[in-house]
């Protein structure tokens, strides 16, 4: 929460808003903690701890992913819900931010265990979620199949079909075309926009993508297809770097369901070593807290585009700012996922489904408008893009809170 609250406070101050605005936005309105008993395949029962945070619902129902990861904490989920509120404010979506998580390691669990855990989580949080309350979506180590199990469980509880309860679903259950690749596609558009502003050519860029899960791998593929040179990638086991460029289609073909591929190579390096390799654009697309005060002075790039949530610490961000490295913040850069989740929710509510080219066209329009607002705010206030992005979002959130009578 510290990283979120630090920039939030600066944005409120730069906008000359009263302290009340900061106080109402600095923490989630509610955080639910649940203990989830799950019958394991060996016959034992294991208790998993889960969370659901709802940051602010002034702009509409809350919205945000559910992650399965061993390091999930209440503090992390709370911060992520706040960042989701900011994303929705920046992109003009009628949502506030939500986030959920379960402390578990899905890599060690069977499909049957994951299904039982997914269904049990929905039962545990069912009173505070729903298509007009709080709409979940996939996140780290969750996918369309997990969303399908959760949807089915919710339908059994409510006793009617509610496709708008959850997004990121399979197409057969009301999912949207383009949703699986939405975050990556949005990041690709952001790279096009920033390249234009910096008078660079995308096809001449040397890019490192740290993280090769759903987001990182698809983004690497889009960059490769556009002619950019992907010189480095990493997964949980390590990194691979080649100044001449990597064969991204081969890597995608060989990666496993968790995005691991570097174990197939002999000359690997650590994730931290990869971050410090020479490139034009560094894209942290893995976990939070990767760029720190310690390694920020050694980064060898001109631009950082944050694909992961919170990959740069507050202290690390200050170093990058002092060094003149442009940082496109997560709340703008990776907002493609929530934008197409919104499109999916709209399609569910209408009962009318769009073709993928229409989804991509509308995604690019939203990303372009959002990027332009943030870039102009940064220029007008002579500040960095992270602070500018928070300012754009806080302005919309504060107005919604004021109209509801929550603040003066």
Image: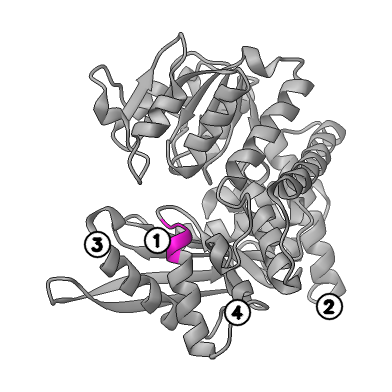
Provide residue 377's location: percent of width, then percent of height: 83, 39
Q: Which of disc 1 and disc 2 is earlier in sequence?
A: 1
| Residue visible at 72% across and 73% down in the picture | 349
Task: Calculate the distance from the C-alpha at mark 2 to the C-alpha at mark 1.
Answer: 32 Å
Q: Quadrant of the C terminus?
A: bottom right
Task: Calculate the distance from the C-alpha at mark 2 to the C-alpha at mark 4.
Answer: 31 Å
Task: Calculate the distance from the C-alpha at mark 2 to the C-alpha at mark 3.
Answer: 49 Å
Image height check: is 209 above or below 54? above
Residue 38 found in image quarter: bottom left
Q: Element type at marker 4? A: loop
Task: Calculate the distance from the C-alpha at mark 1 to the C-alpha at mark 4.
Answer: 29 Å
The residue under label 1 is: 73
Kindly report which numbered mark, 1 or 4, lies closer to the viewer in this rendering: 4
Task: Calculate the distance from the C-alpha at mark 3 to the C-alpha at mark 1.
Answer: 23 Å
In the image, which disc is placed on residue 405? 2
Provide residue 237's location: percent of width, then percent of height: 28, 34
Q: Which residues are magenta?
A: 142-146
Q: Is residue 212 magenta?
A: no
| Residue visible at 71% across and 57% down in the picture | 88
In the image, which disc is placed on residue 162? 4
Image side of residue 102 versus residue 60, left or right: left
In the image, which disc is placed on residue 110? 3
């Amino acid at each position: 929460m510290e990283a979120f609250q630090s920039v939030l406070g600066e944005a409120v101050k730069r906008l000359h808003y009263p302290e009340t605005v900061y106080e109402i936005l600095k923490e989630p309105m509610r955080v639910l903690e649940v203990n989830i008993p799950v019958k394991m395949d060996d016959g034992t029962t294991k208790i998993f701890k889960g969370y659901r945070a709802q940051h602010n619902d002034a702009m509409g129902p809350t919205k945000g992913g559910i992650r399965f990861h061993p390091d999930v904490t209440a503090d992390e989920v709370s911060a992520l819900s706040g960042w989701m509120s900011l994303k929705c404010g920046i992109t003009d979506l009628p949502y506030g931010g939500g986030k959920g998580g379960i402390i578990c390691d899905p890599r060690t669990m069977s499909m049957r265990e994951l299904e039982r855990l997914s269904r049990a989580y929905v039962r545990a949080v069912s009173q505070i979620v729903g298509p007009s309350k709080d709409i979940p979506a996939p996140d780290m180590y969750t996918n369309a199949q997990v969303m399908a199990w959760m949807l089915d469980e919710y339908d059994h509880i409510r006793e009617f079909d509610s496709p708008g309860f959850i997004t990121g679903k399979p197409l057969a259950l009301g999912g949207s075309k383009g949703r699986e690749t939405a975050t990556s596609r949005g990041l690709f558009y952001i790279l096009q926009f920033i390249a234009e502003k910096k008078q660079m050519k995308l096809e001449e860029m040397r890019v490192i993508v740290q993280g090769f899960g759903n987001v990182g791998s698809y983004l690497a593929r889009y960059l490769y297809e556009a002619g950019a040179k992907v010189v480095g990638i990493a997964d949980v086991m390590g990194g691979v770097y080649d100044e001449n460029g990597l064969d991204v289609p081969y890597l995608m073909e060989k990666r496993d369901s968790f995005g691991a591929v570097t174990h197939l190579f002999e000359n690997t390096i650590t994730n931290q070593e990869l971050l410090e390799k020479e490139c034009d654009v560094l894209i942290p697309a893995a976990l939070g807290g990767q760029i720190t005060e310690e390694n920020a002075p050694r980064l060898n790039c001109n631009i950082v585009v944050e694909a992961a949530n919170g990959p740069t610490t507050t202290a690390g961000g200050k170093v990058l700012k002092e060094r003149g490295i442009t940082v496109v913040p997560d709340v703008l850069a990776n907002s493609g996922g929530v934008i197409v989740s919104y499109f999916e929710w709209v399609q569910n509510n209408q009962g009318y489904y769009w073709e993928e080219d229409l989804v991509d066209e509308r995604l690019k329009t939203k990303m372009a408008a959002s990027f332009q607002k943030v870039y102009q705010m940064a220029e007008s206030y002579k500040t960095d893009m992270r602070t500018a992005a928070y300012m754009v979002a806080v302005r919309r959130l504060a107005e919604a809170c004021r109209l509801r009578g929550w603040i003066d």
